Amino acid sequence: MFPRMFTRAAMAAALLTSLAAQADTFTLTSPDIAEGRSLSEAQVFQGFGCSGGNQSPALQWQGVPAGTQSLALTVYDPDAPTGSGWWHWVVYNLPANTSGLPAQAGSGKGGMPAGAVQGRTDYGTTGFGGACPPPGDKPHRYIFTLHALKVPRIDLPADASAALVGYMLNANSLAQARLTALYGR
């Protein structure tokens, strides 16, 4: 009995170690934003009292886990004073072989891969919606998350909420890579 329990425990530990190693190689980076640093005015919303460029940053990723059939990207501000945060960008059905998005891909300037869907943000529109925290708030966190998914596509209505998209992403997630930037005014 003891050897069988030990073997199962060893197998579980090996699996967890493998998943942890895989997560370490799945990375999301950007030439436009840096981990823990402030967003530039280019990534600030144009409206709601903000006057930025409202341009989505260039993003790159590597180490997509084996078995990934599609990717999704979200940008979320957990510090927004709404009780539920604020969704700034929701993109799903990105092809699994995609390795990045050019600057302004979410701003209607081209570069979004064929088949990719930009969902509705909390601004009530599709595409990238930049940072715009209330004046005087501490800097908010803008969490860019790339989701590796075990399904080739997510089928949702065109007006699906970001929460519904998030539900589908979490239900089909293999791994996530994150990049967190800040912005305050």
Image (cartoon, rainbow, N blue to C red):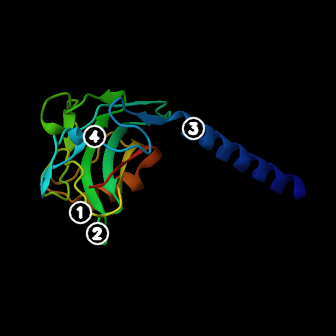
Frontmost of labels 3 and 1 is: 1
- Which of pointers 4 and 1 lies earlier in the amino acid sequence? 4
**Which corner quadrant holds the N terminus?**
bottom right
Mark number displayed over residue 24: 3
In contact (CB < 8 Å): disc 3 and disc 1: no
Residue that mark 1 sits on: 134
Residue at 33 percent across and 29 percent down: it is 100
Residue appearing at x 35%, y 61% in the figure: 138
* Mark 2 vs mark 4, CA separation in Å: 22 Å
Name the residue type under label 2.
Pro
Q: Are marks 2 and 4 in contact (CB under 8 Å)?
A: no
Label 3 sits on a secondary structure element that is helix
Q: CA distance from mark 3 to mark 2?
A: 32 Å
Ranked by sequence position, the earlier of labels 3 and 2 is: 3
Where does the image place residue 135, in percent across and percent down from the top left? 23, 62
Q: Is residue 103 left or right of residue 69?
A: left
Q: Nearer the viewer, mark 2 or mark 1?
A: 1
Rendered image: mark on residue 81? 2
Mark toward the viewer: 2 or 4: 4
Which residue is farthest right?
A: 2
Mark 2 or mark 4, which has the lower sequence index? 4
Mark 2, Cα crowd under 10 Å, few <14 / some 14-19 / many 20+, is few
- The mark that comes first in sequence, 3 or 1, is 3
Q: Where residue 62 appears, x then y in whole percent?
A: 45, 29
Residue at 31% in and 49% down: 75
